[in-house]
Image (spheres, rainbow, N blue to C red):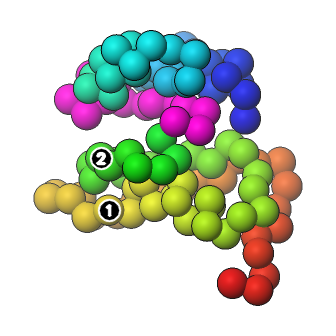
Amino acid sequence: CTVQHAQDLAAAFCQQGVPAACVHGGMSARERANLLDQHQRGTLAVLTNVAILTEGYDDPSIACVLMTRPTKSTGLYTQCVGRGLRLAEGKQDCLVLDFTDRLHELDRGS
């Protein structure tokens, strides 16, 4: 997934009336923090990213994860999907949508 792809995906949601934005490493820490805050407050319904929210990001209210990049790493896939699997008050489930153009070839030995 490239920054352009993540930006295009956010734009596609916006075109459909769904508030969305993209966070990426080329942004200042302040810009990223502002968008993360908007997402946590519910102002942004969708937040796309490129390797920014994969590890260490904790927002238990996330209830949908869209995978748009293939990976061969079971650990990376688990981390990405795990963003939505945290328990939160009032949260009943998490929808995982995998948009990769091929099956994941995850580690078979782990």
Residue lying at the far front of the rendered structure: 29
How many numbered marks does the figure carry? 2
Q: Position of residue 7 (x, y in %)?
A: 61, 19
Most foreground residue, 45 or 24: 24
Image quarter where the C terminus lies is bottom right
Identify the residue at horizontal 45%, vertical 13% (top origin): 28
Residue 100: in magenta span: no
Amino acid marked by disc 2: Asp
Image quarter where the N terminus lies is top right
Identify the residue at horizontal 76%, vertical 86% (top origin): 109
Mark 2 vs 1, N-terminal side: 2
Label 1, secondary structure: give it: loop
Q: Position of residue 20 (x, y in %)?
A: 45, 22
Most foreground residue, 59 or 44: 59
- Distance of label 2 from label 1 (alpha carbons): 8 Å
Quarter of the figure with residue 34: top left
Q: Position of residue 4 (x, y in %)?
A: 70, 18
17 on left or right of 50: left
- In the rendered image, which residue does mark 2 sit on? 59
Most foreground residue, 87 or 90: 87
For disc 2, the neighbor class at 10 Å (few under 14, some 14 to 19, many from 20) is: some
Q: Is residue 67 visible?
A: yes
Label 2, secondary structure: give it: loop
- In the rendered image, which residue does mark 1 sit on? 86
Amino acid marked by disc 1: Arg
23 on left or right of 34: right
Range shown magenta: 39-52
Quarter of the figure with residue 46: top left
